[in-house]
Image (cartoon, rainbow, N blue to C red):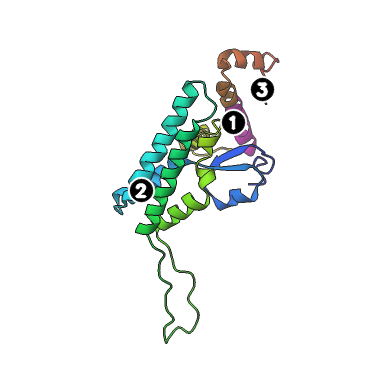
Amino acid sequence: MDAIGIASAFRGTSVHDGLLSYHGYSFTQALCNVHHLRELTFLEEELKQDWARKMKELLVEMKACVEQAKAAGSRELDLLLLAGLLTRYDEIFAEGYRANPPPEKPKKSAQNKRTPGRPKQGPARNLLNRLSSEKWAVLRFLHDFAVPFDNNQAERDLRMIKVQQKVSGCFRTEEGVAMFCRIRSYLSTLRKQGIELLSALECTLSGHPVLPAFT
């Protein structure tokens, strides 16, 4: 991750999947809620956890509230609305903890004289711990409208690299990889900033590249 040269220099907000390696960097943390929706769906459908259904519905409602506020030209949620959403969030994961008490520590047996290690937790309690301990990273999108609900855009940007590998089998040289990634990232940045791609490419090939804004 250091060798890629992005995470170590980035000082904005990174929306990611919760990989522990990200926590060693200085950027502001935000967690992808589409990942949470998938986990909550599994807990609801496979483990019959009703709190998971409620949390999933609340996250989707929060996303809708933010989108409505943005459409109305607001930069933040109404304080009473925000307080109500946060209260419900706390109530739901408290309900989840009641439904998933901590596992009992295994007892020492006559054959095993060593002190047992920490008991293994199930997927429900693991998710509850993340939703609780990293609450503000989970809900960063609710407080800062510049932060997206998920990291789907980043995954879409990377998808064509996987398509290229599948279609062509692989990249032939490191130089080819670098060229492909440079072109893809340039076009993706122009698209995000609303710049017309064909005219930008024409200018670039004629020796007058369009430079995207960096602020």
Disc 1 is placed on an element classified as helix
At 36% from the left edge and 48% from the top edge, which residue is drawn? Answer: 52
Q: Mark 2: which amino acid?
A: Ala
Disc 3 is placed on an element classified as loop
Q: How many other residues sit within 10 Å of disc 3, few (<14), some (14-19) or many (≥20)?
A: few
Q: How many other residues sit within 10 Å of disc 1, few (<14), some (14-19) or many (≥20)?
A: some
Disc 2 is placed on an element classified as helix
At 68% from the left edge and 41% from the top edge, which residue is drawn? Answer: 5
The residue closer to the viewer here, 150 or 172, is 150
Q: Is residue 54 left or right of residue 119?
A: left
**Residue 158 placement (x, y as % from top left):** 52, 35
Q: How many other residues sit within 10 Å of disc 2, few (<14), some (14-19) or many (≥20)?
A: many
- Per the rendered image, the range of residues in magenta is 173-186
The rendered magenta stretch, by its main secondary structure, is classed as helix
Structural distance between the alpha carbons of marks 2 and 3 = 41 Å
Q: Mark 3: which amino acid?
A: Ala
Structural distance between the alpha carbons of marks 1 and 3 = 21 Å
At 55% from the left edge and 27% from the top edge, which residue is drawn? Answer: 75
**Residue 17 placement (x, y as % from top left):** 51, 45
At 33% from the left edge and 45% from the top edge, which residue is drawn? Answer: 53
Query: Comparing marks 1 and 3, which lies closer to the viewer?
Result: 3
Reading the image, the residue beneath label 1 is 180
The reply to whether discs 1 and 3 touch (Cβ–Cβ < 8 Å) is no
Reading the image, the residue beneath label 2 is 52
Against 132, residue 152 (above or below) is: above
Against 114, residue 149 (above or below) is: above
Mark count:
3
Q: Mark 1: which amino acid?
A: Phe
Instruction: Tell me the tag on residue 213.
Output: 3
Based on the picture, tell me whether residue 38 belongs to the magenta stretch. Answer: no
